[in-house]
Image (cartoon, rainbow, N blue to C red):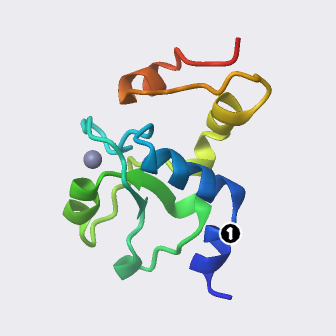
Amino acid sequence: MSARRRVRAKFWYRAYRSRMNEGYEPCRNRGCSRLARTFGRIVPAARGGKYVSSNLTLLCRKCNTAQDDQIWAWLQPLTAEPDFLEIAYGGSSAYCQIDTPQRLRDRHCGPA
Ligand SMILES: [Zn+2]
């Protein structure tokens, strides 16, 4: 099984994909306020970056295309925010609706 297929089977991958499809995830690139629609690599495939959680982040289509083969070292991998899935899916019975990038960044939305 390829690395990509293995990653796609993971809970966190499907959770992020679902949230992107619903329009709840901001692009993780600095200075960008668009919604993320794609998984992006911090180290691009052209530079040998693997399709694994420690190299994946969320990007809007524009940033993902603009990145091309550049390494964007300021991007944080998804695993750097393990508390996020906790906030969105853990503990609280109320599903946390994080509806704007700013609210996610400010962490105003959390379990009661
Ligand atoms: Zn972006």
Relative vertical location of residue 12 with respect to residue 45 in this rendering, above or below: above
Image quarter where the C terminus lies is: top right
Q: Position of residue 4 (x, y in %)?
A: 57, 77
- Residue at image position (45%, 43%) is 22
Q: Position of residue 51 (x, y in %)?
A: 53, 72
Q: Nearer the viewer, residue 17 or 57?
A: 17
- Residue at image position (62%, 35%) is 84
Q: Position of residue 88 (x, y in %)?
A: 63, 32
Question: Would you say residue 83 is visible in this rendering?
Answer: no
Amino acid residing under circle 1: Ala
Using residue 15 as the reference point, say whether residue 36 is left or right of it: left
Question: Would you say residue 1 is visible in this rendering?
Answer: yes
Which image quarter: residue 85? top right
Using residue 90 as the reference point, say whether residue 43 is left or right of it: left
Q: Residue furthest bottom?
A: 1
Image quarter where the N terminus lies is: bottom right
- Residue at image position (53%, 20%) is 107
| SS state under label 1 | loop
Using residue 107 as the reference point, say whether residue 41 is left or right of it: left
Relative vertical location of residue 67 with respect to residue 30 in this rendering, above or below: below
Relative vertical location of residue 33 with respect to residue 19 in this rendering, above or below: above
Question: Where is mark 1, residue-wise?
Answer: 9
Mark 1 close to ligand 1, CB under 8 Å:
no
Q: Position of residue 54 (x, y in %)?
A: 59, 59
Using residue 107 as the reference point, say whether residue 29 is left or right of it: left
Q: Residue furthest right?
A: 91
